[in-house]
Amino acid sequence: MNNNNSKREELLPEAERLFIYEYMPATTIARKLNLNRKTVNTWRAEQEWDKKRGAFLKSKMSFHNEMYEFARKLMSGIISDMEAGEKIDPGRMYTFCKIIPMFTKVKNYEDLVAKKEEKATPKGLTPELIAQIEEEILGITHNDDINETK
């Protein structure tokens, strides 16, 4: 029994990675790693995977905002120099011209990440939620425990 628990605990980092960075639902993780769905959901709650996934997504999404703010400051400085009749530093102008086309690439990437997040958090009754309702409210138990004893 102890050996089974240690094997299961060894899978925790992989399960966490799949949930947070691969946007995989808990049910799929349980199936893929041959774990009980309840085990994965317990880890999810105890380790605060939803919070970690949100932080990961936020860090990816904020890059576009940081890049935009940098470009605005750079543009503002260039405009100030132009209005003051000062010579514009070619390095700043070159940087500004190079950064503008990158916005589209970064935005496309962030949109892709956001779509993955939408798919990872389905609305309504998911198979996972139905199984939880069946188990906790209706008292129907599934043979998921068989996977862990193998």
Image (spheres, rainbow, N blue to C red):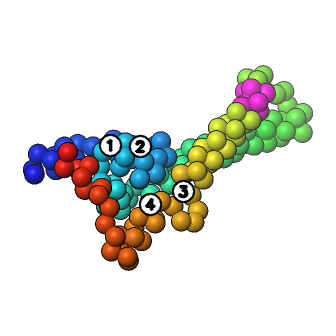
Which element is circle 1 on? loop
Which element is circle 2 on? helix
Magenta stretch: dominant SS? helix
Residue identifier under label 2:
18
Q: Which residues are magenta?
A: 95-102
Residue 17, numbered circle: none
Looking at marks 2 and 3 on the same chain, the residue that comes earlier in the sequence is marked by 2
Amino acid type of the residue that numbered disc 1 sits on in the rendered structure = Leu
Q: Residue at x 64, y 38 (%)?
A: 109
Which corner quadrant of the image does residue 32 belong to?
top left
Amino acid type of the residue that numbered disc 3 sits on in the rendered structure = Thr
Looking at marks 4 and 1 on the same chain, the residue that comes earlier in the sequence is marked by 1
Query: What is the crowding at mark 1: few (fewer than 14 residues within 10 Å), some, or many (at least 20)?
Result: some
Residue 121, numbered circle: 3
Expressed as whole percent of the image width and height from the top left, the position of residue 56 reads 49, 48
Looking at this view, is 19 or 133 the one in front?
Answer: 133
**For residue 58, above or below residue 129:** above
Work out how far the residue at label 4 is from the one at label 1, CA to CA, in angstroms: 16 Å
